Image: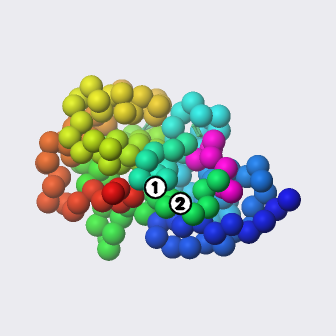
Amino acid sequence: MKRVVQLDINGSPYDVMVAPNETLADVVRRKLGMTGTKLGCEQGDCGACTVLIDGKSHLSCLTLAVASEGKEITTIEGLESDGQLDPVQQAVLEKHGVQCGICTPGVIMSAKGLLNDNPKPSHDEVVVGLSGNLCRCTGYEKIFDAINAVANGEYDDVRPTEAGGE
Ligand code: FES
Ligand code: FES
């Protein structure tokens, strides 16, 4: 039976009527119009739907909306602040880690989750941290360059990478 859940998304509360089997991805995209979160496979394989829940990256296509109540959800729309891109967004842009862009929101949210857990990951830890995000265009190296640059402090003057973190 459908019921209203209150979801905390990007710092704002949303009361949404959802079915028990409705995914968080469907709710943010189709009911709330936050289409920055992408859907690719819808079965946990591609990472395009990655969001942060309580600061950790999760696949929103495999997460039930009802199970997300009471948690702090961050989508790609929640990273920008006062017109200023998040450092990871800025780095991916400047290091040419974007081509078609379908994977990019998920890549950035996975990178945010990784950096929340480990602010100074090694290159190998970045590769492992993004291993759930498929990209058909870039060959990954530019994406890794961008996240390594953030980890190495190159974007420290953009602004702190606090979104969804502790
Ligand atoms: S759409 Fe969720 S993992 Fe592919
Ligand atoms: S930029 Fe096209 S799939 Fe990654």
Instruction: Please rate how many residues cluster around mark 2, counting C-alpha atoms within 10 Å: few if below 14, some from 14 to 19, many from 20.
Output: some
Q: Is residue 95 above or below residue 30?
A: above
Question: Is residue 81 in the magenta section?
Answer: no
Task: Please state which of residues 80 and 69 is positioned toward the viewer in this rendering.
Answer: 69
Task: Please state which of residues 56 and 112 is positioned toward the viewer in this rendering.
Answer: 56
Left or right position of 60 against 121:
right
Q: Which amino acid does the dot numbered 2 rest on? A: Lys
Q: Position of residue 55 (x, y in %)?
A: 41, 53
Q: Position of residue 49 (x, y in %)?
A: 54, 45
Ligand 1 located in image quadrant? top right
Q: Position of residue 75 (x, y in %)?
A: 48, 57
**Which residues, given as a range, are shown in magenta?**
60-66
Task: Please state which of residues 47 and 165 is positioned toward the viewer in this rendering.
Answer: 165
Left or right position of 110 against 73:
left
Residue of label 2: 71
- What's the distance in space between the residues labelled 1 and 2, CA to CA? 6 Å
Task: Please state which of residues 133 and 118 is positioned toward the viewer in this rendering.
Answer: 118
Q: Residue at x 82, y 62 (%)?
A: 2
Residue of label 1: 54
Left or right position of 16 against 75:
right
Q: Residue at x 75, y 61 (%)?
A: 18
Instruction: Please rate how many residues cluster around mark 1, counting C-alpha atoms within 10 Å: few if below 14, some from 14 to 19, many from 20.
Output: some
Q: Is residue 67 above or below residue 95?
A: below
Decide which of tag 1 and tag 2 comes sooner along the chain: 1
